[in-house]
Image (spheres, grey):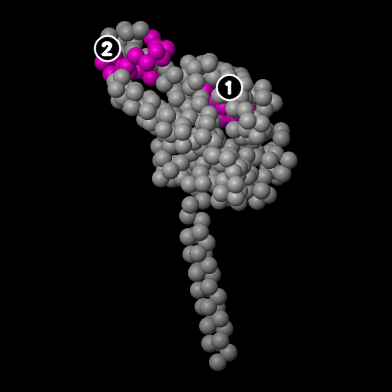
Amino acid sequence: MDPAAEAGYAEHPPRMGFFTDTSVCIGCKACEVACKEWNAIPEGGLDLTGMSYDNSVGLGASTWRHVAFVEQATPNRDAVDLGMPSVPQGALQDDRELRWLMASDVCKHCTHAACLDVCPTGSLFRTEFGTVVVQEDICNGCGYCVPACPYGVIDLRPGDGRAWKCTLCYDRLGAGLEPACAKACPTDSIQYGPLDELRDRAAERVDALHEAGAEQARLYGHDPADGVGGDGAFFLLLDEPEVYGLPPDPVVTTRDLPAMWRRAAVAAAGTVAAVAAAFLGCRR
């Protein structure tokens, strides 16, 4: 529950993180632009995919914040007016309307981060704020961290070969500043602060949405009992995680490694014993 302490920090500030409230995201992409400007991230492609106004497709080595535009046809009787952009009633059918579910995705800064477990050079490390950062000058481009991430966040940059992802603006945190994306967000959809405080605030927001009739509102990645020990960046969603391209039940991919190594050791010991017994039997 205290990843910074587990990483060896005897004294450290409270764990910091993101709470992204997708119910007030307007899809302006200010967070994407601010992230690129502050971190000097190169342009990663501006080709329209035919999937609404989403021109960055997903997270990657050159896209550390990604604003998804999910077009969803919803029965009008189930739609709750949250101020989200929508096509008026009757645009598709008499009893349906189209709404956009917008969400700014980012690295989750997991409590149990598999990318840390598999990095052979120590390029990935846990900060005193509980976040996970890549030191690009130490990364050897092995790519082990890419399949290890249960969210598909971290990636290797073409032409560079090294791994890159969100650092939660580690340089700004050390100076007492909030991350660039949260600073630029005009609706406070992206909120930054101590993780415990954000979880309390998020629970109150979900209760308010339920009272307003948005029964599908839920939190994602906030639970310390989930498969990754809870995320340092969690979300309020208005539908199932799969709708936003998020795994419904993420699990740290290195969870079973200790048991696998134990079984391998037992199998190896059995093989050695069998060979030794056969050798001794032949000598007799």
Q: Which mark is residue 255?
A: none
Q: Which mark is residue 183?
A: 1
Q: Is residue 105 left or right of residue 238?
A: right
Q: Is residue 266 left or right of residue 88?
A: right
Image quadrant where one finds the C terminus: bottom right
Q: Amino acid at mark 1?
A: Lys
Q: Is residue 222 above or below residue 96?
A: below
Q: Nearer the viewer, residue 73 or 149?
A: 149
Give the CA separation, mark 2 to mark 1.
40 Å
Q: Amino acid at mark 2?
A: Asp
- Mark 2 touching mark 1, by CB under 8 A? no
Instruction: Residue under label 2, please give it.
Output: 95
SS for dot 1 = helix
Report if residue 86 lies within the magenta region.
yes
Tell me if mark 1 has few (under 14), some (14-19) or many (20+) residues whose alpha carbon lies within 10 angstroms of its own.
some
**Lower position in the chain sequence, tag 2 or tag 1:** 2
Q: Is residue 72 visible?
A: yes
The residue positioned 67% from the left and 22% from the top of the image is: 37
- x, y (%) of residue 124? 63, 44
The segment highlighted magenta reads 59-87
The residue positioned 46% from the left and 33% from the top of the image is: 197
Q: Is residue 179 above or below residue 29?
A: below
SS for dot 2 = loop
